[in-house]
Image (tube, rainbow, N blue to C red):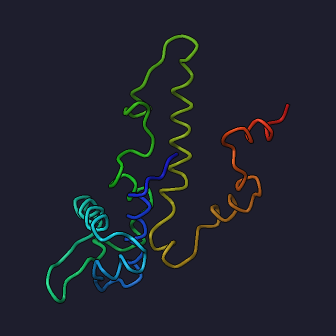
Amino acid sequence: MHITARVDYAVRILLEMARVQPNSVKADAIAGAQDIPPKILESVAAELRRAGLITSRRGPDGGYRLARPADEVSVADVIRAIEGPLASVRGQRPEDVTYPGAAEPLQRVWIALRVNIRAVLERVSIADLAAGRLPGFVTELTADPDAWVRRSGPEAAELSPG
């Protein structure tokens, strides 16, 4: 799974809002705290607003705030707001993809992948991240030293058994 810069920025924007909840926070404060270019921040914030995750108000008392409590916003919600479905195959949802012959089981692999992505991203909330407390299953998954091993490029062949 590829996490885009826009998704990364969106989560960080929401974390700054969660930190001051229920108050609002100014765009320049978010940009400074998270080192996000102001124009990108405003663009990403507009997408979050359209998705109903944040609200904004102009003026001296204005700023951005979460549209609902941080514990009701999952990382999956943020990704869907910015990039669309969590898992797609050639731009289609996995359940809509079919394959002929020997490739027929591949659809179930894509469905299983989506299930596992959801298992993590739908269960980690903005409140969890803002409080610095990850769900136990995330701690367990990341405690495995193998979780930190890169599998891309030529190194992958060296790490593969047999």
The quadrant of the rendering that contains the C terminus is top right
Q: Position of residue 96 (x, y in %)?
A: 39, 27
Please identify the residue farthest to the right as the structure is shown.
162
On the image, which quarter does residue 141 sit in?
A: bottom right
- The residue sitting at 41% across, 82% down in the picture is 19
Image location (x, y in percent) of residue 25: 30, 82
| Residue 24 position by quadrant | bottom left
Relative to 154, does residue 144 appear above or below in the rendering? below
Image: 63 above or below 117:
below
Q: Quadrant of residue 137?
A: bottom right
- 70 and 14: which one is in front? 14
Image: 26 above or below 73: below
Q: Looking at the image, which residue sits at the far top? A: 101
Q: Position of residue 5 (x, y in %)?
A: 43, 57
What x and y, as percent, mark residue 156? 73, 39
Q: Please tell me which residue is depicted at 51% across the width and 60% down the height of the picture.
A: 123
Q: How many marks?
A: 0
Left or right side of 156 for 62: left
Extreme residue toward the left, this view: 59
Residue pictured at 23% horizontal, 72% vertical: 55
Q: Is 55 positioned to the left or the right of 75 in the image? A: left
Residue ID at (72%, 38%): 154
Q: Nearer the viewer, residue 144 or 125?
A: 144
Near-viewer residue (50 or 44): 44
